[in-house]
Amino acid sequence: MNESVITVTLNPALDKTITLETLQVGGLNRVQEIRIDPGGKGINVAKVLRRFGENVIATGFNGGYQGKQLLNHLDELMINHSFIPVEGETRINLKIVDNHNRMTTEVNERGFEIADNDVVQFLNQMDTLLDEASVLVVGGSLPLGASPDIYRDLIHKAKSKNVKTILDADGEALLSGLKAVPFAIKPNIYELEQLFNMKLETDTDIIHAAQKLLDQGVKWVIVSMGGDGSIFISDKEIIRARPFPIVPKSTVGAGDSMVAAIASCLVHGRSLHDTARWATAAGTLTAAEPGTEVCRLPKVIANLQNVKIETVEQK
Ligand SMILES: Nc1ncnc2c1ncn2[C@@H]1O[C@H](COP(=O)(O)OP(=O)(O)OP(=O)(O)O)[C@@H](O)[C@H]1O
Ligand SMILES: O=P(O)(O)OC[C@@]1(O)O[C@H](CO)[C@@H](O)[C@@H]1O
């Protein structure tokens, strides 16, 4: 059995994707297609890791009828899970795909509110799970009632047990998680701009911002930029990765697929170079799937060499 990965999704969702010819804001829209996928960042990561054959367990909070549906989906996908049941309903996040303009509009609910006792149960469970893990992935928004420092505390806990951590969050949750200095972070360009409160126009701007995070002790900073690909930065190398051509269907979960590939590369001790290929192939292939459907291993392997990789000179 491989070493195991834990994915934490404190505020999971059922992702309801509706496809329209063209989104008419303020008008009547007729739906062409509809699908429901289990969602939330850590859950998407777990879906990819399961397909990669990794030993993964998904955890977090879960509630109500929609929460039961979510767990049924995970069972169908044969994903190990151990969610703490809470009062209230797991949210439904609406993803509206405009076929004509190839654009997705996302409407995410706030989700349930958790109580102090839920957090105590969750952290106790994490103590046990972390004893068996080699990588922890934390991602997504915090539910109402969660302390903004919950990501910081989780990352500290993981580090005290020599578990490598990957953080994928935005706003306050990202700031809080960074205080504990995770091994890797994967902000998208907007999240990085928000973190530094400035526009990052060029690759050089992005690299300079990322280097400030490396100075704080983060080992890998991976910045994704949708169809423009991504930059992988460590204190030893800077790698620019560009995707191969695809017809994008829904980019929801593309970033999470990158995170899953990064986790898998950490489990297998792969270099940052190889990680750039794996993560870009995974993200790109997920962007070509409908709804919150994710990439599959054989296609990822077949496309590793199609990822365009350049080493950027350090200045
Ligand atoms: N239109 C596209 N064409 C090709 N590849 C894409 C496209 N959109 C996304 N990708 C691939 O997916 C990766 C991640 O995309 P993006 O930067 O949108 O992540 P994200 O914003 O974190 O996504 P999410 O939060 O929805 O999971 C990109 O680096 C790229 O490899
Ligand atoms: O509201 P959050 O927690 O920030 O993001 C949740 C979410 O948009 O992220 C995933 C895609 O990354 C989706 O499956 C899910 O609906």
Image: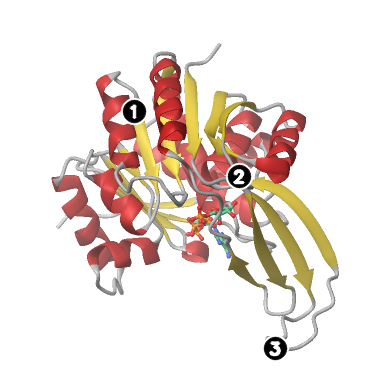
Label 2: which secondary element: helix
Q: What residue type is labelled 1?
A: Lys
Q: Earlier in the sequence, mark 2 or mark 1?
A: 1
Distance in Å between CA atoms under marks 3 and 1 = 47 Å
Q: Which of marks 3 and 2 is in front?
A: 3
Distance Cα–Cα, label 3 vs label 2:
41 Å
Q: In which quarter of the image is the C terminus?
A: bottom left
Q: Quadrant of the N terminus?
A: top right
Q: Can residue 306 be seen in this view?
A: no
| Residue at the (66%, 64%) spot, across then down | 95
Q: Which residue is drawn at 67% across and 54% down?
A: 15
Identity, as a three-letter code, of the amino acid under mark 2: Asn
- Element under disc 1: strand
Q: Residue 26 carries which label?
A: 3
Residue drawn 34% across and 59% down? 171
Residue 255: percent from the left, percent from the top?
50, 52
Quickly name the residue at label 1.
164
* Residue farthest toward the top in the current orientation of the protein: 1
Please name the residue that numbered disc 2 is placed on: 303
